[in-house]
Amino acid sequence: MLQKIVIATHKSFNPPDDDAYLPLQVGAAGRESLGFATDDTGDNISGRNSSFCELTGLYWAWKNLDADVMGLCHYRRYFNAPPAHIAAMLESVDCILPKPRNYFIESTYSQYAHAHHAVDLDTTRDIIAERHPDCLAAFDATMKSTKGHRFNMLVMKRPLLDRYCTWLFDILFELEKRLDISAYSEYDRRVFGFVGERLLDVWIRANGIRCAELPVLHTESQHWPKKIFNFLRRKFLPRRK
């Protein structure tokens, strides 16, 4: 069984020594090559990386790779298990996801609204109601949950990845048409990557996908004191424009 786990990166790094991993320079269009595969070949959305983030890598893998098992991680975030172990896990489950993040005092919706723009999710809900109404209850339940899988990290067998990506990009491309992000900060312009993180849980819930969760291995500092401070500030203080 051929397995390819794309490692999305925008900088040079030392990739793991395992043929299952494929380092991929995302947002490569118009930029100097880092010496890895690039997401600006074949059918691609590389030029939209500033707003789709690592999802330009997922799109490229979906459209251009031929593998039985496919996944996505980051140059500084990996599943804390070797690819061979991940492949073995997929014999009994449909999908591998990172351990979820628990916001405790925030729902998925309120945390996003405090950190970004609520209209992003409100418009996403409208699109799902119109184009995928069978997923609307799962969207609402996901938005109310305090837990969620983040980073757009996943590993799936190819047929399931095809289903997920078809659904995901149908929604995100429509969202891209409807949202005016011209006044967004550089950070908030990453909106389609951020929304995509939340949509993964919606799709998993709506389709009853059997998942196993693995811890995430972080190779760089997560700056938790700063993250916690910003989380509480956004929760209890008005959003700074």
Image (cartoon, rainbow, N blue to C red):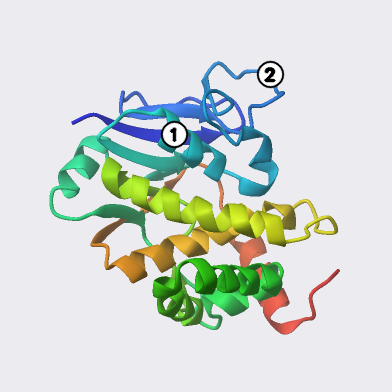
Q: Is residue 54 left or right of residue 155?
A: right
Classify mark 1: residues with Cα within 10 Å, few (<14), some (14-19) or many (20+): some
Quarter of the figure with the C terminus? bottom right
Q: 15 and 205: which one is in front?
A: 205
Secondary structure type for disc 2:
loop
Q: Is residue 130 left or right of residue 30?
A: left
Marks 1 and 2, how far apart in space?
A: 23 Å
Give the total number of marks visible in the rendering: 2
Residue at mark 2? 32
Q: Which mark is residue 92?
A: none
Q: Quadrant of residue 175?
A: bottom right
Q: Is residue 25 left or right of residue 166?
A: right
Residue for point 61% across, 29% down? 11
Classify mark 2: residues with Cα within 10 Å, few (<14), some (14-19) or many (20+): few
The amino acid at mark 2 is Glu
Residue at mark 1? 63
Q: Position of residue 72 (x, y in %)?
A: 42, 42
Residue for point 70% across, 72% down? 119
Residue for point 45% across, 79% down? 145
